[in-house]
Image (tube, rainbow, N blue to C red):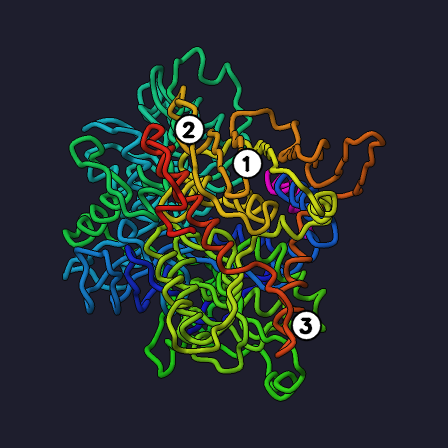
Amino acid sequence: MKQVLIKAGAVQVTEVPPPALAAKEILVRVERSCISSGTELAGMRMSGMPLYRRALKQPENVAKVMMMVKEQGLKRTLDRVQGKLAAGSPTGYSAAGIVVAVGDQVTGFAVGERVACAGAGIANHAEYIAVPVNLAVAIPPEVDMSDAATVTLGAIALQGVRRANPTLGETFLVIGLGILGQLTVQFLAAQGCRVIGVDLDRERLATAKANGLDFAIDPNTEDTVERVHKLTDGFGADGTIITAASASHSIIREAMNSCRRKGRVVLVGDVGLDLKREDFYKKELDFLISSSYGPGRYDPVYEEGGQDYPLPFVRWTENRNMAAYLALLAQGRVKLSPLQGKHYPIDAANQAYADLNSGDGEAGQKPLYALLDYPERKGDRTTRVAMRSGFATTHSTSGKIRVALVGASSFAQAVHLPNLAKLKDRFVLRTVMSRTGSNARAVAQQHGAEYCTSDLAEVLADDQIDLVLIANRHNLHGDMTLAALRAGKHVFVEKPLALTEAEVAAIEDFYRAKKPAAKPYLMVGYNRRFSPAMAEVKAHLQGRTTPMMISYRMNVGFIPSDSWIHGAEGGGRNLGEACHIYDLFCHLVEGATPIKITATSVTPSGSQWQKNDNFIATIAYSDGSVASLTYCAMGHGSCPKEYLEIICDGKNIIMDDFRSVTLFVPRPRKWKSQTTNKGQFDELKALGDFLAGGDDKGAAPIELESLLATSRIALEVERQIMTEGGASAPFATAHGVQ
């Protein structure tokens, strides 16, 4: 499909795979999408700035980059940033089209229905968009597609008016008469308010006057504050709504000085916010921020999870604002025809942005907004997009392991893809699959894959793929792993292997079945066992004669409760992260089997903590060893994250955060590393060496029995800590361990 991407201050229309459909989403074939002259033009200009200027304007992103440098190193971070910039970014947040597919858990929408859609990163300028149910509304029969495509702008303006809480007969000042300001004027007029408008553009003032504005102020020729007070008998406006976009700090001062005592100022646009106490203190003004489309915005549970707010308690959500706006259009109470919207075909998107930025070349006047049109075309839903030719010929006989990356996550981009590149004598990246087509293309382009796709079936049907590397959300791991194994592909899946016993059992059944005789290899990304520090620990355990006492502490830090990690996609921190340590325990006891598990969670002292944030799990093994994990999210961030102590054979072995290993014996020995190396490179190297071994393969990097045991330990720990410390289980009996 075609999609608009912003790159280096320019607009590109690029072929990308259409998005994959989630359970609570609808797939929409876009007929119109709306470009606003504010937010999107600002984003385009920002993309054209040198990195140092962007850093000055977005210091919050600088902090993220510095954290990446700390965790991943300078070169890897620069490669990622430059690769992302070179690939371009999706844009757009308001569109309308026809539903062509619905997710398994969708109700209220049907194929063939006309819908209007909202959301940055969702309602993109693209031929197809996957839209969560709370960001789509049905279009009334009286409203055409072009008007419906402005639904996001309408909802933003409507929410700003709701925050102002106007009443019949009040006087409101609207500063900035772009498309948001024009709609705000019409909404206020429909509320029975007197409306004063301010804009530097005389044409916009005239347009607003024709659509409900009572008084127009040109700040080039008159003082706004003085004029507003004259129009309100010296009292000032009851309220001001700022819909302008400007870095100037004077706008906010002007808005406050134009208000009466006890008035209110609502910020919808993006202006300088150097607030002066004296501007609103003496008048006791209310300063309000309007959060985009309305309640629900920026709440992943509402927007991505599809969980609505009850109407009696939250009357106007973003979805209800969208529907209310379309209803006003249907009733004729809001009119878009006078607002100078202009149509462009999708292939002329660059011209649309240029006209919005500098004038349309006909009358020299900037359109208030532009509409992109998407005519139907053959092949627009093709899920495979070629990136370069000649791949199969070049690599099919090279003896390399051909890899499909499924899930182009940040972790995969930061860790696995650079490591695959380092191991280019063993691996070659054939394809990148991501449910977001633009992300699939960007990563495939940066790392030299032959093609990109948004469809797992495309990957599984490709006989030129040897290994599927799965690195997406945790809840998808089990099913995708089994599907890839059944397709005859070797699988490397990031931890965890699965989130349910049923998924683990299905994978086990696949390997226990008699056919096919030659089974593909399965490996899980338990990298810590491959680290240099752990190799040193294992060397000290060679020839041990006594059971071990193993104590491990993970000081993992706080993650907010609304993070995906805590939800259904992540499965929580025990299943999603602590499994690393259960694998280490299995690695250290080497052949012994778990026979008993006891797990207890700290009773949460506040709602910010989950039961699986802070707990202690103890596992007894068949060789007499006992391993204990203390997993804590309420420790101090300056304390090292991971600490291991092993006691056996009259010696103590301490591993400190993968940077040092100390052996306490009569003559202590210490191993040190300059960096924290948790073994991600070494695990891929071990996998590559094993798969390339042919008939002479040695021992598998991780045996299947160990993988299954690790998953089941994690599941049992989860059961106990989530059921108020449920009774400990005889693990060996429950899972048939002899």
At label 1, which amino acid type do we have?
Ala
- Can you give x and y, in whole percent of width and height, for residue 313 in the image? 20, 30
> Of label 3 and label 2, which has the lower sequence position?
3
Q: How many marks?
A: 3
Front disc: 2 or 1: 1
Q: CA distance from mark 3 to mark 1?
A: 36 Å
Task: Report the magenta residues as a range.
Answer: 50-62
Q: Secondary structure at mark 1?
A: strand
Q: In the image, which is nearer the foreground, mark 3 or mark 2?
A: 2
Direction right: furthest residue: 667
Q: Residue 726 lies in what quarter of the image? A: top left
Q: What residue did someone put label 2 on?
A: 600
| Closer to the camera in the image, 2 or 154 | 2
Question: Residue at 32% of width from left, 47% of height from top?
Answer: 305
* Residue 309 picture location, percent across and down: 23, 38
Marks 3 and 2 sit apart, C-alpha to C-alpha, by 44 Å
Secondary structure of the residue carrying numbered label 3: loop
Which type of secondary structure does the marked residue at label 2 adopt?
strand
Q: Which mark is residue 426?
A: 3
Mark 2 vs mark 1: which is more N-terminal? 2
Q: Position of residue 474 (x, y in %)?
A: 43, 52
Identity, as a three-letter code, of the amino acid under mark 2: Thr
Label 3 vs 1, first from the N-terminus: 3
User: Does residue 95 sit above or below 660 in this rendering?
Assistant: below
Q: Out of 647 and 485, give the one closest to the viewer.
A: 647
Question: Which residue was labeled with disc 1?
Answer: 627
Query: Is most of the magenta stretch helix, strand or loop?
Result: helix
Name the amino acid type tagged 3.
Answer: Arg
Task: Give the residue at the far top of this rendering.
Answer: 282
